[in-house]
Image (cartoon, rainbow, N blue to C red):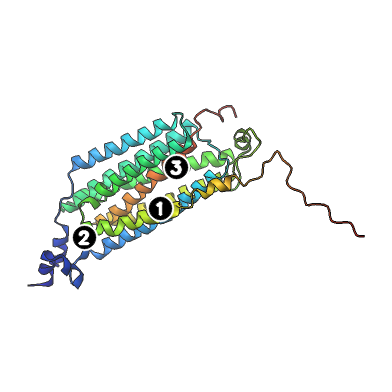
Amino acid sequence: MSTEARAATFPAADWEGGAFPYRVGHRKLGMWLFIVSDSLTFSALLFGYSYLRASNVWPTPFPFWPSIIFSSVMTFCLLSSSLTMVFGVSASSKGDKDKARKWILATIVFGVAFIVLHLIEWKHLLDEGLRPFYLPEHWAKVFTTTDGVPPSPLFGATFFTITGLHMFHVASGAVYLLVVAARIKKLKHEDVEISGLYWHFVDLVWMFVFPLIYIMSVDAHGHLAGH
Amino acid sequence: MTADAHVEEHFAGTNKLFISIWVWLVVLTLVEIFLAYKPMSIFLMLVVLLGLSIIKAALIVAYFMHLKFERLSLILTLIPALVVCILLLSVFFPDSFRSAGLRYKFQEQPPVAPAPLEEP
């Protein structure tokens, strides 16, 4: 009996070599391990942001228009891109490479839309005067507490670092997917699945970045409206 | 190689399932945006947002990334260690409250060193 056939019947034999522990190939396992390590990178950055936020006076400057509308549409774009990616992987599993390619291209379109909207958001904030280590003057005035403590100038640093690193992941993911879509006829189904895993990870990170960075800094009472 | 064919044959999920997961994700996102404008303590807001985000992440990992249908050994290798590492990071979060109390109050004058002793 071949090692492969034996491996199917005895779980312990998975680890004796010549079989597939976890029932996934090494490339897929490698992508999962990368995803775990990258999750820790983002967790560390988000933790650093949370720590700074809890220990300082923090501005909450995001107005409904444009910031919350833009970031909500961006969230919708990423969620839809995950759906189209899942359809692409499903088509690939059925052997329909042309359909898979179309769904992957749709995913890339949503991803690029996300990046364009995000860059426009960045431009809004940069135009207002936000920099990594400086707040716009009107923000500093409005968000100074009643006992005179000014808001932390590190708002920009945390915002641009976390959203910038995430945007970098979206951009590299879009390039990765473009290569997969172009070469799909030569690739195995597993390779399409692996690119799907990376893309879903990018969406997953945004599920945390959006509430912690945007929702937690909503200008709910319109403090900045008059300025 | 026969090994590849052997690896792939398990339930991948119907398109209907994927669309319903997507609908849930969109609904939960809309709930988060709605809650942003409801008055509540920042601590409660954080707990609710983190809870919703974890649910959304779990839906994506389980269904879109297909982890629910993989072998248990893969799930156990990836998830518990990640959760433990994130909790270890979070252990230091209460230190931010101590740190918040350390900043000197801007209304008071900063402390001044005592005058040097006169030479006899």
- Amino acid at pointer 2: Lys
Residue A122 shown left or right of residue A193 in the figure: right
Observer-nearest of A213 and B5: A213
- Is residue B115 found left or right of A183 in the rendered image? right
Q: Amino acid at mark 3?
A: Leu
Spatial separation of the CA atoms under disc 3 and disc 2: 38 Å
- Residue B76: quarter of image: bottom left
Residue closer to the observer: A78 or B13: B13
Among the two numbered marks 3 and 2 on one chain, the one whose residue lies closer to the N terminus: 2
Mark 1 = which residue? B87
Q: Chain of mark 3?
A: A
- Could you tell me which chain the residue with mark 1 belongs to? B
- Closer to the eye: label 3 or 1: 1
Res. B78 mark: none
Q: Residue at x 16, y 58 (%)?
A: B8
Q: Quadrant of the C terminus of chain B?
A: bottom right
Location of mark 3 (residue)? A212
Q: Quadrant of residue B32?
A: top left
**Residue visible at 26% across and 48% down in the picture:** B62
- In this rendering, is residue B23 above or below B90? above
* Residue at numbered disc 2: A188
Asked whether the residues under marks 3 and 2 belong to the same chain, the reply is yes
- Disc 3 is placed on an element classified as helix
Instruction: Find the residue positioned furthest to the left.
Output: A1
